[in-house]
Image: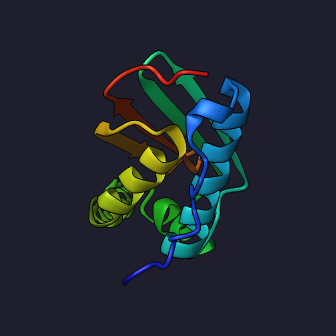
Amino acid sequence: MKANLNYIGKNMKSNSSGKGELEAKISEALINFEKEYMGRGPLEAKTYIIDDIVLVRLKGVLTKAEHQLAGACQNSSEGRELIKKMRQTLIEKARPLLEAVIENITGLKVLSLHTDISTVTGERIIIFTLVETPRF
């Protein structure tokens, strides 16, 4: 699956933005990513920039089918593990795209990306570490 997300993050360098504006642009870009690449956007997104770390919290990312799968095996974690593995694989395939989005918005290179998803709350956390702290 190839996503066309060229519009995300264009001309959004941090040199003309305050911290709150930069965080809002990242949230908007990740919502667009989830909608276009994953097929469904989160119900809510919030970004926090802490020194050289960008933390994105996405709420309500699971589809109805994933909710069914997560709850289908009450005595087994098989459904939850399948969801986590699929979502992790999709993020790994999209990693260059996600890093490019963050680099376009912040003007800084991404060093690493870490993510996890809760099949109980339907929340995803994505953490990017940058080469340095963005300047506001």
Q: Note whether 83 is above or below 2 in the view shown.
A: above
- Quadrant of residue 113 within the rendered picture: top left
Q: Quadrant of the C terminus?
A: top right
Residue at x 32% of width, y 57% of height? 95
Which one is nearer the viewer's eye here, 117 or 80? 117
- Quadrant of residue 73 within the rendered picture: bottom left
Q: Residue furthest bottom?
A: 1
Which one is nearer the viewer's eye here, 125 or 12? 12
Residue 66 image position (x, y, % from top left): 51, 68
The structure's colour scheme is: rainbow
Residue 83 image position (x, y, % from top left): 39, 63
Residue at x 49% of width, y 79% of height? 4
Which one is nearer the viewer's eye here, 18 or 24? 18
Q: Is residue 12 left or right of residue 54?
A: right
Residue at x 55% of width, y 25% of height? 49
Residue 86 image position (x, y, % from top left): 33, 66
Which one is nearer the viewer's eye here, 115 or 72? 115
Q: Note whether 65 is above or below 18 in the view shown.
A: below
Q: Quadrant of the N terminus?
A: bottom left
Q: Residue furthest top?
A: 51
Q: Note whether 135 is above or below 1 in the view shown.
A: above
Q: Is residue 99 left or right of residue 70?
A: left
- Quadrant of residue 82 within the rendered picture: bottom left
Residue 51 image position (x, y, % from top left): 47, 15
Q: Is residue 58 left or right of residue 117?
A: right
The image shows a total of numbered marks equal to 0
Q: Note whether 66 is above or below 56 in the view shown.
A: below
Asked if residue 91 shows in the view, the reply is: no
Residue at x 46% of width, y 46% of height? 102
Asked if residue 30 shows in the view, the reply is: yes
